[in-house]
Image (spheres, grey):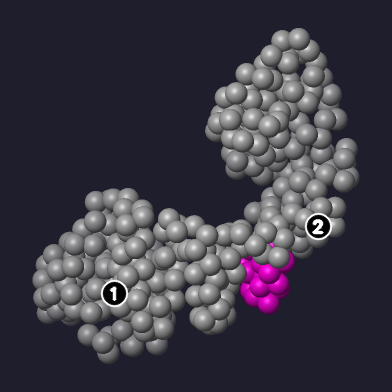
Amino acid sequence: MSYIAAGEHELAIEEFDDVLDNDPGNVQAWCCRGAALVGLDLPDEALESYEQALSIDPNSSAALFGRGTIHAGWGELDLALEAMTQAIENTPTMAGAYLGRGVLHAQLDEPDLALADFDTASKIDPSDAQVHIHRAELCAQLGFDAEAIAAYGAAIALDPENTDAYMGRGTTYVDMGRHRQAITDFNRVIKLAPTDAYAYLARGGVREVTGKNSQALKDYSHAIRVDPENDLPYFMRGRVLLEQGKFAQALADYERVVALEPDNPQGYMGRGCVHLEAGDAERALADFNTAIRLDPANPALYFQRGVAYLHQGNEAQAEADVRTAAALGLDQETIEALMSEQ
């Protein structure tokens, strides 16, 4: 097990193979071998090890838990739920199985069952910060912001260097409009994990919505430095640069988005907006058409294309696109506000 804890999964498998050569009926060795194979991202082979363990002991909770994690990773949630429940029935004190089943209930849109499992897992093992994090994430999804903040706080109390907890709490603070607290949490993530691009993006997003665009640009640029193959910071930086009227720089960022993710409609939308602001409606239309082909149910894309048609003097097509945007869910108040900006 020490090899697994150290991330030395190949060495762990060699060790367990040696054990199994001498004792092929060793259920624990089969389970540990499965866990090591999961660490190597070999789920098919891992499942074979767990099934071998279950062929020896059909009531092995460790093997059932392992089987459940494999099925969950494959999106086979019903099979995963069945395996986790069997593990719990066999070992009612298995905190990890309650946590795993709680996550499955959350994915199956069964929040009450999920919260009950998280609570049970926490009672069995009060020292597991991950239980509080999963509970907090679910509470945040349900709109229970105060409960989410409390659960993230409990996770941080148990594990003061857990970046997921700070990131989640910071994101919840953003949703609550508590920007100062959000910045504090994102700062903590950056201090603990200075190469976490998403922490810079999150902090930059708060700075952008609070009107601190120069600081937001610094955060987006830092995110690019630590993760230059990630299209999101280019998109976010391009948005600010476009707002500042720096069309050439914004265009360069959106070109990078398109190059990195050619199937991402947002890159074409952003580039189209730059072309439109620069007075090139023809190129803007080409980009909006591509974006619509990639995401035909996005009302904002039709609205932007309508604006491009309006710049060309094609009022009939512009009105048709605005009607389509409204039919797809863009409300009249938003349409009027956007049109007033044109």
Residue 328: percent from the left, percent from the top?
40, 71
Which type of secondary structure does the marked residue at label 2 adopt? loop
Q: Is residue 280 visible?
A: yes
| Residue at x-position 11% and y-position 67% | 282
Taking the image as shown, residue 84 lies to the left or right of residue 191, namely right
| Depth order, front residue of 288/296 | 288
Can you identify the residue that label 2 sits on? 126
| Residue at x-position 62% and y-position 18% | 14
Separation of marks 2 and 1 at Cα, in angstroms:
44 Å
Which type of secondary structure does the marked residue at label 1 adopt? helix
| Depth order, front residue of 3/261 | 3
Residue projecting furthest to the top: 22
| Residue at x-position 49% and y-position 57% | 193
**Dot 1 surroundings within 10 Å: few (below 14), some, or many (20 or more)?**
some
Can you identify the residue that label 1 sits on? 240
**Residue type pointed to by label 1:** Val
- Per the rendered image, the range of residues in magenta is 135-155
Residue 31: percent from the left, percent from the top?
73, 28
Residue 221: percent from the left, percent from the top?
31, 64
| Depth order, front residue of 44/15 | 15
Q: Quadrant of residue 2?
A: top right
Taking the image as shown, residue 76 lies to the left or right of residue 262, namely right
| Residue at x-position 66% and y-position 44% | 77
Q: Is residue 145 magenta?
A: yes
**Dot 2 surroundings within 10 Å: few (below 14), some, or many (20 or more)?**
some
**Residue type pointed to by label 2:** Pro
Q: Quadrant of residue 147?
A: bottom right
Taking the image as shown, residue 146 lies to the left or right of residue 339, namely right
Q: Earlier in the sequence, mark 2 or mark 1?
A: 2
Q: Is residue 53 above or below residue 197?
A: above
Q: Is residue 263 above or below residue 76?
A: below
